[in-house]
Amino acid sequence: MAIRKILLPLTGTAAGESALTTALMTARIWNAHVTAMHVRVDSRDVAPLAGEGLSGAMIEEMMSATEKESGDRANAVRNMFERFVAAQHVVVAEARPNAGTATASFASVTGREEDLVAQQARLADLTVVPHPEAGEDVSSSDALHAVLFDSGRPVLIAPQTPPTTIGTRICLGWNGTAESAAAVLAALPWLQQAQAVRILFAEGYQRRGPGAQDLAAYLALHDVHAEPVTFHNVGSSVGAGMLAVAKDFGCDLLAMGAYSHSRLRQLILGGVTRHVLEHATIPVMMCR
């Protein structure tokens, strides 16, 4: 299935700018529509956080300040959206006017970001999210994890620096799990037009399930030639080994399953998903 709708939860950070560029590049590849959504803080949520001992007037003042700050941020994000869309020569429209044009639209909504993003992502072919900010705990990337765990749809994590190409040389992180199988299915449209595809597998990464050769045979039925390549840990890190082989290949899109171990285990002990989220410098498409 070709990509026709891309959801972009949009923030005003530098990482958000890279995600916007990545989403617009993807839209141009697929002649798709980007729905850029900025979620404003609901000023009514401030009141329960204010605590006891504050007068009604003080709470009202806090709510007004929150509303003003939220509005200013929404305007700044919209201006950034309009500037980047013009630079990428993407048409601003509510929907694709025809099959040969990439389009984008902007919406500012109020509520809880993780809830609204996950809900809207259920009717998007792909959701592009910013790379976790430097120094930020990956486990607190609410929009990213909301899409992974509560949308049933793939998520594309944009790199911190916008890529020059996406999807010409693709690596599949394969370990035989249902999560990696979902990633293969999501990547299939990309695989069918890629210049080169590699299946990355390792003894310490494989779980119970089909092996890399089985995946290569399956992809051949879809007219995709994929070369299975084994990789080795860098130090004790499976994720570092995978990223190193992808870099040597000149990979510009890595597709893989996410959290085949529990998220709590990865938070405490580390894991492939966590390492890739923290250290990848290329677009990474994940499925859960």
Image (cartoon, rainbow, N blue to C red):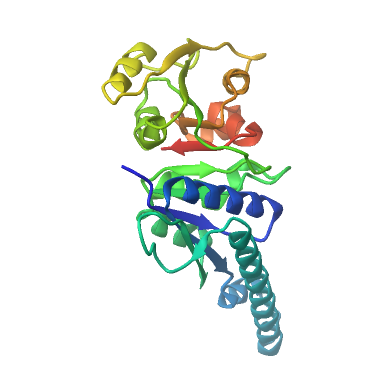
Q: Please say whether residue 217 is visible from this viewpoint.
A: yes
**Residue displayed at 64% across by 77% down:** 71
Hey, which residue is sitting farthest left in the picture? 221
Left-right relation of 56 to 145: right
Looking at the image, is 39 positioned above or below residue 182?
below
Rendering coords of residue 273 (x, y %): 54, 31
Q: Please say whether residue 209 is visible from this viewpoint.
A: no
How many discs appear? 0
Location of residue 250 (image quadrant)? top right
**Residue displayed at 34% across by 33% down:** 185
**Residue displayed at 66% across by 88% down:** 56
**Considering depth in this image, is 19 or 139 the residue closer to the camera?**
19
Quarter of the N terminus within the rendering? top left
**Considering depth in this image, is 191 or 47 the residue closer to the camera?**
191
Rendering coords of residue 16 (x, y %): 64, 54
Location of residue 77 (image quadrant)? bottom right
**Considering depth in this image, is 284 or 133 the residue closer to the camera?**
284
Rendering coords of residue 126 (x, y %): 43, 48
Hey, which residue is sitting farthest front in the picture? 100
Location of residue 180 (image quadrant)? top left
Looking at the image, is 147 positioned above or below residue 47?
above
Quarter of the C terminus within the rendering? top left
**Considering depth in this image, is 226 or 208 the residue closer to the camera?**
226
Rendering coords of residue 116 (x, y %): 45, 62
Left-right relation of 57 to 216: right
